[in-house]
Amino acid sequence: MKARTLRKAVLVAGAALVVRRALRRRIKDSPLWPLPALEEPTSGRPRARALRLLVAGHERVADGVVQVRLEGRDLPAWQPGAHLDLILPSGLVRQYSLCGDPEDTSSYTVATRLIPAEEGGRGGSREVHEQLAAGAEIEIRGPRNRFPLDTEAPAHLFVAGGIGITPILPMLRAVEARGTEWRLLYAGRTRASMPFLEDLLKLDGQRGRVTVVAEDEDGRPDLAAALGATAPGTAVYCCGPEGLMAAVEDLLPEGRELHLERFAPRNSADGNGPFEVELRRSGKVVQVAADTTVLAALRPEVPGLAYSCEQGFCGTCQQRVVEGEIDHRDELLTDAERDDAMLICVSRCRGERLVLDL
C-alpha cells in the first residue's frame, strides 16, 4: 500500500512539473497568455508599478513652496537628479524632483511651488498644497532619472531658477562630498520665495561658491559672466523656467557639457500647425487642430486610450508611428525609440500626416 501511494505521489508530482514547464513556455511565447500571441506590435507603454507611501511631513519651506516627506520601507534606491511620479488623490499625475538624501531608504522628499491658474497651473500643485496632509497615503511611481549627475566632470556649474533648485540640491551635496569643484547661481523672484537658501549657504561654508540673485533686489542674473568664468570640461546643470534654460543654451561657451531638466513640454521653433492622423488598424483619419494635441484628438475615437501626465514625461501614451515625420517634444524617449515612436500628449507632426499603429 505504501509503495502504491508513493508511486502515485511521484506520478502526480511529475505531471505537475510537466504542466509548470509547459506554462512557462507558453507565457514566454506569448506575454498575453492565455490570449494568442500578437503578430503585430502593441502600441503603448505599461505603467510602472506604483508604491503606496505615507505622507509623514508637509511643511512650508518658502513663500508658495511646500516640502513633502513620504515614508515607506526598503524604498527603491535613487541618485541625484531623479524624480517621482506622484499619483494625486484626484488621479492627476505630476512629476517632482527628489531633494532629500539618497542614502535614506525609508523616505522620499519632494518640494513643489504653487502654480496659480493664471500662470498655467492645471491643479496638480494646488492639490499637493491644499489636499495632501500628514497622515494621508499617496501612490508614487519611480524613482526615474533623466537628469543624472556626471561624476567624472572636473568641475560643475549649477544654475537654478526658483523651484528648479530641487534636483540640484542633492547634486551639490554629492559633489561637495567628492571634493569636486563647483559653483551655484541661484535666481528667484524674491529671497523669501527661494527654498533651501539656508541649506545652500551652510553647504558653501562662506567660500563664495553660491551666488544668490533675487530679482526684486538684484535684477536679472548675469548668465554670460557665470558661464564665461567656467573652464573647458565643466559640466553645466540648469533647471528652472524655460526662458532661463534657453538663455543658458544660447550663452554656453564651447567645450562645456550642458544638462537640462524640464518639467514642461519642450517648445518647438516650428510652432503648432494642423495635420491629420491615420489610425492604421481601423482606417480612421482624425484631424489634429493647431490648438489641440494628438491625444485630445484621438480620445473620442479610441476609447480607453492610455495616458497619464499629459506633459511628455511618464511615457504612458507612447504610440508606434508607422509613417510620417515626428516633431518630438518630450523629455523621455531615447534616440532609438524616437525613430518610430512618439508621446502623443505633447509631440506633433512636422508635415501634414502621421500614421499610427492604432
Image (cartoon, helix red, strand yellow):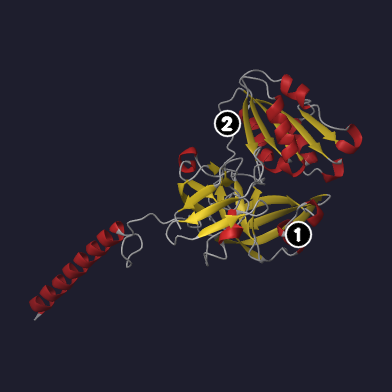
Task: Name the element at disc 2.
Answer: loop
Q: Crowding near pointer 1: few (<14 within 10 Å), some, many (20+)?
A: some
| Residue 118 placement, left or right of 124 | right
| Residue 323 placement, left or right of 176 | left
Give the number of callouts: 2
Badge 2 amino acid: Asp
Which is more toward the observer, 330 or 324?
324
Residue 188 lies in what quarter of the image?
Answer: top right
Q: Residue furthest right?
A: 217
Residue 137 lies in what quarter of the image?
Answer: bottom right
Residue drawn where x is 75% and y is 55% of the image:
121
Locate the N terminus and report the quarter of the image it occupies. Answer: bottom left
**Residue 220 location (% of width, % of height):** 84, 32
**Residue 269 location (% of width, % of height):** 66, 37
Up-down relation of residue 168 to residue 77 (above or below): above
Q: Crowding near pointer 2: few (<14 within 10 Å), some, many (20+)?
A: some
Q: Which mark is residue 150?
A: 2
| Residue 82 placement, left or right of 4 | right
Q: Which residue is mark 1?
A: 126
Up-down relation of residue 97 to residue 253 (above or below): below
